[in-house]
Amino acid sequence: MTDTLNDRLADYTAVAAELGVDAVALVPGPNFARAVQHPFSSHERPFVLIAPVDRAPVALVPNLELGSWDLVGFDGQVFDWRDQDGYDAAFGAMLSALKIGSLAVEGQVMRVFVHHAMLRAQPDLRIVDGEVAISALRMIKTDADIEAMQAAIDISERALAITLESVRLGQTEKQVEQRLVQALFAEGADGLAFSPIVAAGDGSARPHAKARDDYALKAGDPLLIDFGAAKNGFAADITRTVFLDHVTDEGRAVYDTVLRANMAGLEVTRAGVTAHRIDDVVTGVLEASPFADRIRTKTGHGLGREVHEAPYIMRGNHLELPAGTVYTNEPGLYEIDNFGVRIEDDVLVTEDGYKSLTSFPKDLTVLKC
């Protein structure tokens, strides 16, 4: 990513040309943040940045945001509007000045009322969903992106160590979750990348379990913790599963299988490998085990400004991963009403292999608590 906003917007005008449209529109969210390098929230007030192929960019900005907008270094025309007047006139003025016939938008981010406001202003405007191409620009991380992600991961791992040291039998999942959140902020998190998953016993068999306030940790329980800090606009996403007091033979066998699958995925990771290939190798290890009926999820997903973003590491996705991609390698095995195990690393794809951004130990751990 280059240094000026106009240089960064050139990436989006290139996408517009690729899609055969006159411009790309961005609204507050991860792509918007990548472009302007400044945090803006999505709320009831329309806020749109448009990058045309053959002319200067424009922005529709709520009047109360003008002071913050001045900080991003935007030198295009700005159409502001006030709550008292509504935004339709601003949309009309902006599209009249642009003189475009077609526009690519973020299909998973742009809200319906913004889409409708554009069409009220210009009924013949052709709007297409450019989500895949627009978001693909975030797949290759810059050095600054990786630095921010590493900071989020380091914070997360320190918080996990603190949390595990405090775990005691008889605590509830909710109490462990509260300690984890406290530790994340104490270690420097700007926020939570997502609501943590803290699940013990049979709760660990539900991949997206919620921490319970009525389940007390017991000897022999697996304790699955899936969480991440947010730092400087980027997310961490880490899972570790430990056992409390002791581990059964079944628990040990399941854990060993998941760990071998995780390591197999790392071994095939390098620039040019397909998402399909990684998942095929990882899932193949799980399928060859006695626990194949416990497979419930794909191997992982991209990670960056969003916790879940492209590429999705799954069979059938033949996208070749370029160097600079970060993905989660998170195989798991889950048996409902019994237990589950997941091990998740954040992995940077390099030209000749990979770098694991996570370094927290993943050998089977039994907490003497």
Image: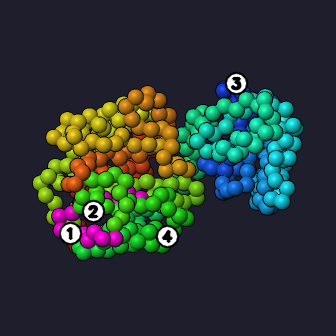
- Which amino acid, mark 4? Phe
The first of marks 1 and 3 along the sequence is 3
Disc number for residue 200: 2
Q: Is residue 190 above or below residue 330?
A: below
Camera-nearest label, 1 or 4: 1
Q: Where is mark 3, residue-wise?
A: 20
- Which amino acid, mark 1? Lys
Q: Is residue 138 left or right of residue 78?
A: left
Element carrying mark 4: helix
Q: In which quadrant of the rendered image does the N terminus lie?
A: top right
Q: Residue at x 47, y 29 (%)?
A: 319
Which image quadrant is residue 104 in?
A: top right
- The range drawn in magenta is 213-227
Which image quadrant is residue 102 in?
A: top right
Q: Are marks 2 and 1 in contact (CB under 8 Å)?
A: yes
Q: CA distance from mark 1 to mark 3?
A: 60 Å
Q: Where is mark 1, residue-wise?
A: 218
